[in-house]
Image: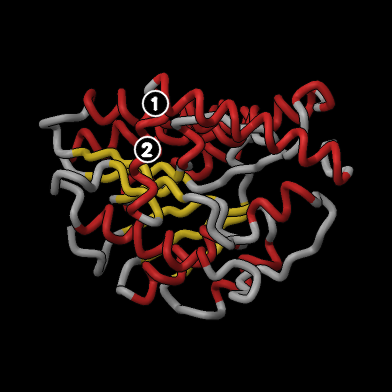
Amino acid sequence: MRIENLGIVVTGASSGLGWATSLHLAKRGAKVWAVARSEDALQRLAELHPNITPVVADVSSADDRARLAELADDVQVLVNNAGVAWTGPFAKMEATDVRTMYEVNVLGLIELTRLFLPTMLERGRGHIVNISSVVAWFALPPFTIYSSTKFAVQGFTEGLRRETLGRGVTVASVNPGPLPTGFFLRAQQPDISLPSGDTTVGPGSNLVAYAVTRSIRYRHVPGYQVVTVPRVLGTCRLAVAPVIGRAFDVVALGSRQWGQIFGTDR
């Protein structure tokens, strides 16, 4: 699928992966609707390229999702990137934190896909990219709940990919590893202010943007239905093996003991 002239929606576009992906696709000729809650950040992004149209919306809002669905006739690709994270022991999480993570990372993603998918199926052409994570295959503290949301995203992506086989619509996941994107810095320090689009904050974001682009271009090519960044982290899928799982147990135990010694175990 050629990037040029494609209509593409990218959620979570006000910073990090979404910012880099929106700009990367726009520079390659796509018409990009950049979606996020921050109007100021989206306006700054839109100033960087004429192919970017800012859309202020919250994917966890049913009303905002319905408004986004009005773009369905003009959109060939949906990039579900919006996400939130929280770091720390599950026992210290507030119920609202858990609920917010599932509303954005899982339910918002699924519901937005549900609204765009029928039009794609009707015309027999379309592509959906879900930004997942390597922690979709193994869960490690302090990202227990975040990992569980990505497990859900990965399962949904895999099932939907099989549902749409032979119907012209392709579904893929892009699974970043621990790249310097600024995302987990926000999770560790929720009140920190990071300048949107500042490459010094998240240089790894560009690597993910390239991966999203490859997922679109080579959507029918075997091996591009799940793209890890970097590719070598595809071996993380072996984490389901008992021996590898035991190794992660040791890592988790060591991390907790290290945190207790240095006071970083919250």
Q: Which mark is residue 244?
A: none
**Residue pictured at 32% horizontal, 34% vertical:** 117
| Element assignment for label 1 | helix
Is any atom of residue 70 visible in this view?
no
Residue 26 position within the rendered picture, expressed as x and y whole percent measured from the top left:
39, 71
Hey, what amino acid is under mark 1?
Answer: Phe
Residue depicted at x 79% and y 26%: 96
**1 vs 2, front mark:** 1
Looking at the rendering, which quadrant does residue 108 occupy?
top right
User: Where does residue 152 sit, x and y in percent of width and height?
Assistant: 48, 25
Location of residue 107 (image quadrant): top right
Does 135 sit left or right of 261 as displayed?
Answer: left
For residue 129, what is the image quadrant?
Answer: top left
- In this view, 25 is above or below 108: below
- Alpha-carbon neighbours of circle 1 within 10 Å: few (<14), some, or many (≥20)? some
User: Neighbour class for label 2 at 10 Å: few (<14), some, many (≥20)?
Assistant: many
Q: Position of residue 49 (x, y in %)?
A: 47, 79
User: x%, y% of residue 222?
Assistant: 15, 44
- Specify whether 63 is left or right of 210: right
Q: Nearer the viewer, residue 251 or 133?
A: 251
> Which residue in the structure is indicated by mark 1?
156
Give the residue displayed 54% in from the left and 31% down from the top.
248
Q: Relative to 47, say whether 252 is above or below.
A: above
| Residue 53 vs residue 243, the one in the foreground | 243
- Identify which amino acid the numbered label 2 is placed on: Phe
Task: Count the numbered circles shown.
Answer: 2
Q: Where, quadrant-wise, is the C terminus in this rendering? A: top right
Q: Which mark is residue 116?
A: 2
